[in-house]
Image (spheres, rainbow, N blue to C red):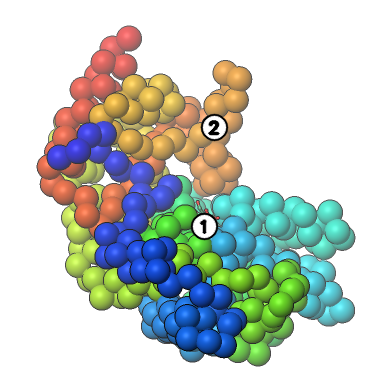
């Protein structure tokens, strides 16, 4: 077992060796420009189209509905600004939630500075948006609803299917940031009724700096990049072939190994929680609702222990992240926990532990042991 044990898979994942192998020929050999008509260009064009197909199979759409981007942030920017700008004649109202990633909230704030109005929907104590709130927030000038599929900090899964039904009944476009959910839970866009969906490669064992955006056929989205017309003119710029090939392979693997990975993430999370409860009893508490969350995510409160000190104390042995940011000595609690009405002391003692598809029993046993020992050490101070 390698140390430190990595349990922060929601932050990023390592590149799957199968993904790396698939990319190597495009690093070492196949360098042609996909827009060139001779063979080494066409070879790369074909590789892109193969990857597009692999991504589309994972989320159940047509390959032409996928464009490749530089990651989750770009996909969110493209979706939100793209829809807002394309529909500015219709209205300038956008509905989102209070627990989105900054790659959504900051885009909405930017649009607000341009004169768009944003409704920030609250969540309940588990971090769930109520579809009824969505319905009530809709106005005649609403052009977009953007609500994440699953939350990165607490793992809560949103009732996207119900929200999509409301959006469509009112003729409003629905975008979902699925950076955390793709590859972990079912993200069938047809079944869920989604118009735009964000994919971030580095959350599903592809490299960082690659992503995709699903745009349902017929959805009006303004371009953010103008240039030589790659990606059907939607996102110009010579394609990042190496990483596109990687993302395609990662999606193929995510589809192929879905059941196995899901089971492993769930089992490891359960062992982790049970192990901690056995050792620490009521000194540990979970934020959110594990019955409706990503299979790998645990937002966990260690009674009266400051999360930053905790995470840094164990960082030679176990890597986890915190739900709060510490700025010059002041604790600023995460906007997600704040929206869930988690009190400041609880939020300051919250860490996020996220397991991966290859997390092992040994790693979990070691993490439980280390975390418990450090807990007792810190709480006896
Ligand atoms: C929910 C969510 N959306 C968007 C992003 C941003 O994705 P990227 O890092 O690929 O830009 C992340 C990454 O942390 C995320 O967790």
- Where is the C terminus found, in terms of image quarters? top left
Q: In which quarter of the image is residue 350?
A: top left
Residue 212 location (% of width, % of height): 52, 70
Residue 347 location (% of width, % of height): 47, 34
Q: Which of 296 and 340 is in front in this view?
A: 296
Q: Which of 339 and 104 is in front in this view?
A: 104
Q: Nearer the viewer, residue 21 or 288?
A: 21
Q: Nearer the viewer, residue 103 or 296?
A: 103
Against 55, is 28 above or below? above
Mark 1 or 2, nearer chain start: 1
- Please report the residue visible at 19 percent of the width from the left and 67 percent of the height from the top: 260
Q: What element carries label 2?
A: strand
Looking at the image, is mark 1 or mark 2 nearer the viewer? 1
Q: Name the residue under label 2.
A: 325
Against 109, is 318 above or below? above
Tags 1 and 2 touching, CB below 8 Å: no
Residue 304 location (% of width, % of height): 38, 23
Mark carried by residue 209: 1
Horizontal side of residue 162 vs 311, given as left or right = right
Q: Does residue 198 appear in the picture of this structure?
A: no
**Is the residue marked by circle 2 packed among few (<14), some (14-19), or many (20+) residues within 10 Å?**
some
Q: How far apart are marks 1 and 2 (CA)?
A: 24 Å
Against 360, is 181 above or below? below
- Please report the residue visible at 79 percent of the width from the left and 78 percent of the height from the top: 87
- Please report the residue visible at 25 percent of the width from the left and 75 percent of the height from the top: 256
Horizontal side of residue 133 vs 8, given as left or right = right
């Amino acid at each position: 077992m390698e140390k430190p044990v990595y349990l922060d898979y929601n932050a990023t994942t390592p590149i799957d060796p199968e993904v790396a192998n698939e990319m190597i020929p495009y690093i070492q050999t196949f360098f042609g420009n996909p827009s060139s008509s001779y063979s080494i260009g066409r070879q790369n064009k074909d590789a892109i189209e193969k990857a597009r197909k692999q991504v589309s199979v994972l989320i159940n759409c047509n390959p032409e509905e996928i464009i490749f981007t530089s990651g989750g942030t770009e996909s969110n920017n493209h979706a939100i600004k793209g829809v807002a700008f394309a529909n500015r004649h219709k209205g300038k109202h956008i509905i989102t939630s209070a627990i989105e990633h900054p790659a959504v909230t900051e885009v909405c704030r930017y649009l607000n500075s341009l004169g768009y109005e944003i409704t920030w929907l609250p969540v309940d104590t588990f971090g769930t948006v109520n579809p009824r709130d969505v319905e009530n927030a809709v106005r005649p000038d609403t052009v977009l609803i953007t609500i994440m599929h699953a939350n990165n900090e607490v793992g809560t899964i949103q009732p996207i299917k119900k929200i999509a039904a409301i959006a469509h009944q009112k003729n409003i476009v629905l975008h979902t940031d699925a950076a955390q959910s793709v590859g972990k839970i079912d993200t069938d866009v047809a079944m869920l009724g989604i118009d735009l969906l964000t994919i971030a490669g580095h959350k599903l064992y592809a490299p960082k700096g690659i992503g995709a955006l699903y745009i349902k056929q017929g959805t009006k989205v303004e371009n953010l990049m103008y240039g030589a017309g790659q990606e059907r003119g939607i996102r110009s710029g010579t394609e990042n072939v190496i990483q596109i090939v990687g993302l395609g392979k990662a999606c193929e693997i995510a589809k192929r190994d879905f059941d196995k990975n899901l089971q492993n993430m769930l089992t490891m999370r359960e062992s982790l929680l049970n192990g901690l409860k056995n050792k620490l009893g009521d000194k540990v508490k979970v934020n959110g609702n594990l019955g409706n969350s990503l299979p790998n995510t645990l937002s966990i409160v260690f009674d009266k222990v400051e999360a930053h000190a905790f995470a840094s104390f164990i960082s030679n042995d176990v890597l986890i992240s915190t739900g709060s940011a510490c700025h010059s000595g002041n604790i600023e609690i995460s906007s997600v926990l704040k929206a869930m009405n988690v009190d400041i002391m609880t939020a300051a003692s919250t860490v996020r532990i996220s397991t991966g598809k290859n997390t092992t029993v040994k790693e979990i046993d070691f993490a439980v042991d280390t975390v418990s020992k450090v807990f007792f050490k810190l709480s006896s101070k």
